[in-house]
Image (cartoon, rainbow, N blue to C red):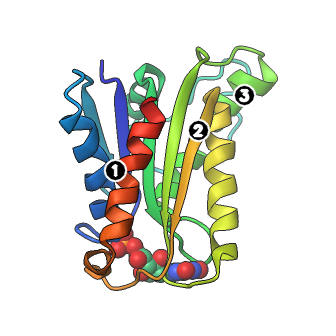
Amino acid sequence: MAEILAIQGSARRGGNSDSLLGSALGALQKAQDGSEIETLTASELDITPCRSCHGCWETGICVIDDRMQQVYRQCLEAEHIIVSAPVYFTSLPGQLKVMIDRFQCFWVRTYRLGSPPRPRRSGMFLCIGAMDDTRFFDSASLIIRTWMSTLNMKCKVARFYHGLDAPGDFEHHPDYLKDAAAAAKELKG
Ligand SMILES: Cc1cc2nc3c(=O)[nH]c(=O)nc-3n(C[C@H](O)[C@H](O)[C@H](O)COP(=O)(O)O)c2cc1C
């Protein structure tokens, strides 16, 4: 069982979200506190979108048998979940949003059946955007906080990094890389 589940939410590999996530995970590995880290790339998941079929309505269990069944287990087992993702049209990349929508069965467990996952777990969100206007982060942040609450998890740390567009832009922001590392320590502190 991995204590930390890290979710890479960008459609592109090796970009800004990937690099900031790498910095955060590097800080955790350096701390050498024995926490096991598991990573997952949303764009590589072979999953189908939520069909709103209400197949989970009475049980809180999704009836679609695909890779999400493993993602559910990973999210239930982790003490901390870290999501790193860019803003797309004020929201999140479709691949990540498809994954999040599939947690409707957890919404059912938590809010309809009154049987939420175990408490006292925490999450972190690293959000990346090209624009300097921080309002672009608002909806993405609300989506992540709402998703984490269906997992009975608090989004303890959220960081917003603006002015990053081309894949290598993070290199011009050593302050951002340092901050992502500090954020990871805050999550575990
Ligand atoms: C489809 C699409 C929509 C985007 N929408 C926004 C936006 O609404 N606000 C913003 O600040 N940046 C927006 N961006 C820019 C990305 O957030 C930016 O390029 C980011 O650095 C990408 O992160 P990555 O390198 O991890 O993929 C958009 C990019 C794409 C491809």
Could you tell whether 166 is left or right of 147 in the image?
left
Q: Amino acid at mark 1?
A: Ala
- Comparing 118 with 122, the one in front is 122
Expressed as whole percent of the image width and height from the top left, the position of residue 28 reads 28, 37
Quadrant in the picture for residue 39:
top left
Q: Is residue 156 above or below residue 133?
A: above
Q: Quadrant of the N terminus?
A: top left
Give the SS element for disc 2: strand
Query: Is residue 36 visible from the viewing direction of this image?
Result: yes
Do the CB atoms of the residues marked 2 and 3 lie less than 8 Å apart?
no
Q: Amino acid at mark 2?
A: Lys
Mark 1 crowd level (few <14, some 14–19, many ≥20, 10 Å Cα): many
Task: Using the numbered discs, state the Cα–Cα distance from disc 1 to disc 3 in whole angstroms.
Answer: 35 Å
The residue wearing badge 1 is 181
Expressed as whole percent of the image width and height from the top left, the position of residue 149 reads 67, 34
Do the CB atoms of the residues marked 1 and 3 lie less than 8 Å apart?
no
**Residue at coordinates 53% horizontally, 57% vertically from top-left?**
159
Q: Which mark is residue 108?
A: 3
Q: Amino acid at mark 3?
A: Val
Task: Using the numbered discs, state the Cα–Cα distance from disc 1 to disc 2 in whole angstroms.
Answer: 15 Å
